[in-house]
Amino acid sequence: MSRLFRGITIVWVVLRYGLDGLVLTSFQKPWLRLLARIVSIGRNLDAPRGQRLREALERLGPIFVKFGQVLSTRRDLLPPDIANELALLQDRVPPFDPDVAVATIERAFRRPLDQVFVSFDRVPIASASIAQVHFAIVRDRHGVECEVAVKVLRPGMLPVIDNDLGLMRLMAGWVESLSADGKRLKPRQVVAEFDNYLHDELDLIREAANAAQLRRNMEGLDLVRIPEILWDFCHADVLVMERMKGVPISQIERLRAAGVDIRQLARDGVTIFFTQVFRDGFFHADMHPGNIQVSLEPGSFGRYISLDFGIVGSLTEFDKEYLAQNFTAFFRRDYKRVAELHVESGWVPADTRINELESAIRAVCEPYFDRPLKEISLGMVLMRLFQTSRRFHVEIQPQLVLLQKTLLNIEGLGRQLDPELDLWSTAKPFLEKWMLEQMGPQRLWREMKAEAPHFAKMLPELPRLLHDYLNHKPHDHRRELLELLAEQKRTNRLLQGLIYGGVGFVLGLLLLQFLIRFRLY
């Protein structure tokens, strides 16, 4: 019943904000445009279409807001008025009542607000689909006052998300059973992955752990700052972290006026992404502009600031190596190797003809090399690859859906910062260096260091093991050896008998045939 009610609510919101007409007017057919005008009769749709779309997504809840955030980064695919409105979803979702935020904090800490914080700004600095952020000052365990950002979970999110995910599971089941591509696309597994990520985002302790891991991973890179977590002030509904001071990355003119090298910033973004994916296998998977700032402070001028770690992606060693080899072969235009890797990984049937898959991949990818980012749409490349995958029955890998989403975000961000950026030439040296480290002496040294504790435990035991072997094993070993020799002698005698018998039988046949012919003649 709840799914039915939610479905009715979605239909009502679509009609209330005129999204049906928005879809129909996007087509070029005159009769569809006429239908759009007819269905809009009697409804007040004076607000601009971008505003109506944004308000509808806000009304529908966090899953739809996430969808709008992803779309907002793709200005190459959307009209400017819609892209500008959807950009407001990144950190300008209507906030909830500050009194509710205060009540959530006091319930989490089990004490009044003024006993938790030295000061607390009740007006939120940012509000998104899952939570909103307030600035505050706390006194840490050493008595030092620190400026912090307090993230408070938006109330009532779990039932809404569960209802929407229930509808998505139902629709995924229909797609899988009714569509010829359903089994290959694995929609139910994709929804299950999405389910995990969204529920993880509702646990702010998990988000704090993600931030701490990314901070450790990025320490030596000097390209990005990640806030320190104040664990003494963290709960499932409240997260307290170091306050970061920066300029939103979407304010490009302000950054340029401050002296930030925008082109270098774009290249650094590519480096950060590939480092997190291929070196660490642990990456920020919600990199829309609302979660990224740029530092203007003297000690970290021009460095990225990452925020909001509710959604992160992780890759296994197999996924990392497979993807790295694919990217490297792709950058070298070795399409045969790309095709072979798809077969080796089991992503396409084993009987796929390599030369046909190679030719199809070449036709998709070759037109995009040696071109600046402004002339490339990764979305269109993925769409053409998707069409190719249907022909060769490529199975969608649910664990890589977040990576594909993040890659689209990175491309959209790079397009805004530096349309002349050559994505391929920027990424190629990093991947080649990483592959060399994976297959060279550095990897051997890392694996030896990883096994060192095991070796250290075994070494003291070696003298005792050797002594026990010399005292007890030779007799048993000699007896087993004698038994083996005796058995081998019996086997040799049997083989000799068989050979002699076979030779005698053949000679007998030859002699018999000779005697028969002699008598005939």
Image (spheres, rainbow, N blue to C red):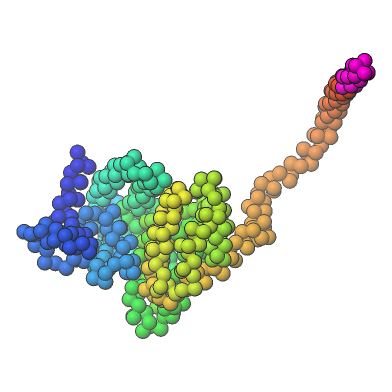
Q: Is residue 388 above or below residue 333?
A: above
Q: Quadrant of residue 463?
A: top right
Residue at position x 57%, y 58% in the image:
336
Q: Is residue 21 visible from the viewing direction of this image? A: no
Measuring 7% from the left and 59% from the top, which residue is drawn there?
41
Q: Residue furthest left?
A: 42
Residue 250: image x %, image y %? 33, 73
Residue 262 visible to the viewer: yes
Does the stretch in magenta take in 508? yes
> How many numbered marks does the figure carry?
0
Image x and y of residue 462, in percent: 76, 42
**Residue 425, image x, y percentages:** 52, 72
Instruction: Reply yes or no: does residue 215 show up in magenta.
Output: no
Quadrant (top left/top right/bottom left/bottom right) for the N terminus: top left
Give residue 287's position: percent from left, percent from top.
38, 63
Point out the image quarter for the C terminus.
Answer: top right
464 to the left or right of 48:
right
323 or 39, which lies in front? 39
Please state which of residues 78 and 148 is positioned toward the viewer in this rendering. Answer: 78
In the depicted structure, whether residue 402 falls above or below residue 259: above
In the figure, is residue 486 to the left or right of 221? Answer: right
Question: Which stretch appears magenta?
Answer: 505-521
Task: Please tell me which residue lies in front, 518 or 428.
Answer: 518
Q: Taking 80 as reference, is 368 left or right? A: right
Which residue corresponds to the image point at 67% horizontal and 58% vertical from the top-left? Answer: 445
